[in-house]
Amino acid sequence: MNRRAFVQHLKKELPALVADGVIDDASAERLRERYGTEASRVGLMSAALSSLGALLVGGGVILVIAHNWSEFPRAARAALSFLPLASAIALTAFAVWTGRRSAAWREGLGIFYTLSSAASIALVSQTYNIQGSGESFLFAWALFALPVVYLLDSAGASVVWLGTLSAWFAVRFSMAAPWAWFAFAAAFVPWLGWRLLRFLELPSTALAAWAGFLSLLIAAAALFQGLGGVWSLTGLAALLAGMHLTGEVLSGHLASSWKNPALVLGRFGSLALLLTITYPDVWRWTLRHGGHRLEWAAIGWVFFALFSAGWMAALWVGWTRRARQGFVLGAMPLAILAIGQASSTLGTKGAALAFDLYGLTVGAYYLCRSTATRSLADLNLGMGLIAVLAILRFFDSNMGILARGLTFIAIGTAFLVVNRFLARRWEREAGT
C-alpha cells in the first residue's frame, strides 16, 4: 500500500476507531495532523474561509444598518442594536446543541460572536446616549467575548479577545491598575493550557499561543518599567529566557518552529534585548531610571519573582531532560544582573562592551552547534548575530563611507560563501 492509499484508508478508519474507543478524539486529531490528510487540509481551509465569511457578513450587516440608522425610530434602533448579538447567541446555541464541532463552525461562529458583541455594545450606547469611554467599551467587549472562547473552543475568538484585552490595557496603562492585564488574562490560561496539553500540534493551537505570548510580552515589558534600574531589564530577560528554554524542550515534540512560539519569541526576543543593551546610552538611561509609582513597583516585584521562578524551572527541566542547547542564551538574566551590579566599576561603556563579548560568545556557540547538528538554521543564526554586532559597531565608529561599504561587502561575502560551502558539504556527507 502506497502512502496516499494508506492516508486515504486512515481517513476512513479514524471515525470508527474513535467510536469503538480504540483511540480518543485528541489522538485522532494528532494522527490527522501527523499524516497531513485531506481532511486536515480541508478543515483548515474551511476554518479560514468561515472566519473570512463571518468577518464579511458581520461587516456587511453593520454597514447596512448604519446606512439607514437615522430613519429608524428609537424602539426599532434598540431592537436592531441587539440583533447582531442575538443572532450570534442563537447560532452558537444551535451549534452546541446539534454537536457541530468542526473547525469551520467553531472559528466562524467565534469570530462572528465577538464582532457582534462589539457592534451591539456600540449601538446600544449610541441609541440611549450612554456616556462612556474607549476604556469602558473595550472592557465590556472583553467581558462578552471571553465566554465564547470556552464555549466554542475557538482560536480565532481567542485572538480577537487577546487583541481587545491588549488594547484595553494600553488605554488603561496611563491610569495605573498595573495588575489589570494579568488578572484578566488569568481567565484565559486554563483554556490555553488545555489546548496545549491535548492539541499541541494543531495550527489553531499555535495561533492562540502566538497571540497569548505576544500579549504577555507587551504587558510584561510595560509592567517592568516600574521596577527601575537593572531590575527592569533582568525581569524582561527572565521572561524571554524562560520562554526560550521551554521552547527548546518542546522543539522535539513539534514538527515546525512556527508551532513553537515560545522558542521563536523567546530566542529572538532575547537576541533583540541583547543587541539593545550593547549601547552605552541604554545602560546610562537604565541606571538613572529609578522606577515610578509604588503600586507599579509592588506588583512588578510579584511578577518578577514569578517569571524568575519560571525561568529557573525551565533551566531545571532542560537540565534533567538533557535539552541544554539553550543554556548559553538562557543565562542572559544572570549576565544582566551581574554586569548591572558591576556597572559602577565598569561604567556604561564597559557594560555595553561586556554584552558585545557576550553576544559574540552566543554567536560562536551557535556556529559550533551547527557543525554538530548539521543545521543551517543554527549556522545562519550564529553568523547573523556576529554580523549584526559588527555592523552596529561600525555604525558607531568614525570610519568613512567607503571603508564601511567595503567592510559590509566583506561580511556579506563571507556569510554567503560559508553558508553555501557548508550546505554542500553537509549534503555530500548525508548522501554517503
Image: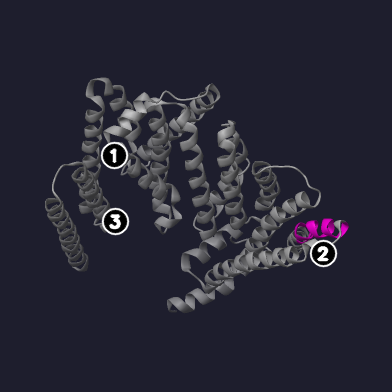
| Quadrant where the C terminus is found in the figure | bottom left
Q: Secondary structure at mark 2?
A: helix
Give the labeled residue for mark 1.
Answer: 328
Most foreground residue, 7 or 233: 233
| Label 1 to label 2: alpha-carbon separation | 67 Å
| Label 2 to label 3: alpha-carbon separation | 61 Å
Q: Identify the amino acid type marked 3.
A: Ala
Give the labeled residue for mark 3.
Answer: 377
Where is residue 263? Give x, y as percent: 40, 48
Q: Does residue 82 show up magenta in the picture?
A: yes
The rendered magenta stretch, by its main secondary structure, is classed as helix
**What stretch of residues is rendered in magenta?**
75-87
Q: Identify the amino acid type marked 1.
A: Val
Please identify, in this view, whether the residue under mark 1 or under mark 2 is nearer the observer.
2
Q: Secondary structure at mark 3?
A: helix
Q: Does residue 416 show up magenta in the picture?
A: no
Contact between labelled residues 2 and 1, with CB atoms less than 8 Å apart: no
